[in-house]
Amino acid sequence: MARSERDEIEETALPAVLVRRSDLPVPLAHPARSFFGGLPKLPPQFEWPTGQVRANETLETVGLTFVAQIDLAEMPGSGWSPLPDRGTLYFFCSSVFVGEGRPPCRVLYSPTDGSAYPDRAPPPNLMPLAGAHGDAQVKWLDPALDFHSKVEFKYPLSFRLFRDFYFHSDTVGGELMIKELCKALGPGQPPEDDLLQFRGSAGYAKDEDWPFNWLLITYVVRSVLSHVQRDLRGGYHDKPHTDDVTAELKRLRAGAIGWLERCRALTPMDGVDPDTKAAFRFWWFDVVRAHEKLDGQVRTYTSELPADLGNAINHTIRCMATQHADACDDAPLSHVANLARQNHWKTPTVEDGRRRRFSTALHQMLGYGSGPQDATEVHLEDMLLLQIQGDPAFFNWHSDVGGVLHFWIDRDALDRRDFSQVVATYECD
């Protein structure tokens, strides 16, 4: 009897492990042994890995971004996994992906468990996320002041076994893939975008919950100031600004600097009294109206301002979550729930399965992996150590679900437990 297409794809099935992060980040002191971001619990004999990263058209040797720590004893797969039964893997990579199909990376392995050592303090030369002046760098975070401009938030991980199939774009393969994912993750929830990042200024006018602390005000003011200062440094389409445009930009800059001075005198996590909240909202909407009038005369688009506000709210809630377990109680419940919801498994469609592209970030170890280009095919004979899909948990450098970061190892090297030659690939659609 001739084999069906389903039979042929079924025969390609490989056991693999889904890597699921927590909805919200946790304090650095959280006892997780497997986690994204935070600080690695490196053995003392290991140096923090460095690499040559492009900055301002030159190569600079910097401390690489710490991506993940995985305690292999916490993974399912005893008896079939080619990975060591015990020990800890530490993943480091450049977080500059623009023009880098193979970003510099290092993977370290220790036979000890993930809680054997204290957190390793970052080195002085640790690269900013997305690199110095990188396209995906968050301009309103200051590497000299903001810890999370260089260190990602810490998210504990859990692991779920599933079967992975080899196909690129196939309806039958997609059906099998969806069946396996739903078996591991459940049927899913209705898709829903980030309600903050994709709303306009009119949506924020109806939302009375912000600003809710001085840290948020600081971030929002810095975001405005970064746009205004960039616009003041140059004209528009190589034409100098008119006197009226320059005067308006200077007015906006003066207002932002005034709010920053107020922020410096207050504790970041303190709440905002009603009068100050009203004054700040009036100022922000004045900035929006000013940019509407400046449309076509400066580089900043009006839509960037509410997008920055949404990012700043999410970032502030993440910062609050790193303080202690109940810190987010001081943030609006709807804003916290919106951020937590971004990690929930969304109900997949037939098209999602066929294209192996899901609205929820799918991280995995082993199996074939997926990506929008050809990395999985090029590395078919290698072992997939870790796949990290673009995820809103990560800030701008890797928040786009269309981007996929892979770590690959030669099978013979894995047998020898030699992780020195691991290579990373980055693809985006």
Image (cartoon, rainbow, N blue to C red):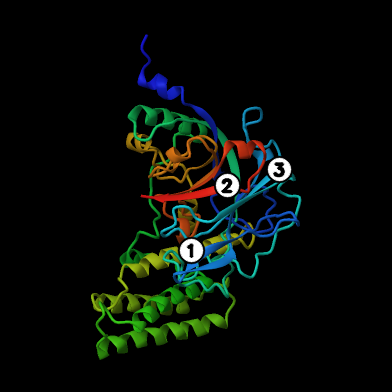
In the rendering, which numbered label is found on residue 356? Answer: none
| Residue 262 drawn at (x, y percent) | 51, 83
Q: Whole-percent x and y of residue 24?
A: 55, 53
Q: Which residue is mark 3?
A: 87
Where residue 274 appears, x then y in whole percent? 47, 75
Q: Nearer the viewer, residue 189 or 158?
A: 158
Nearest the camera: 228 or 252? 228
Left or right, 289 with reference to 91: left
Query: Which of the 4 quarters of the picture holds residue 122?
Result: bottom right
Residue under label 2: 422
Label 2 SS: loop
Whole-angstrom CA distance, mark 3 to mark 2, is 17 Å
The answer to which image quadrant residue 253 occupies is bottom left
What residue did someone put label 1 on? 130
Point out residue 119 in the picture as x, y percentages from the top left corner.
Answer: 70, 58
Q: Mark 3 or mark 2: which comes first in sequence?
A: 3
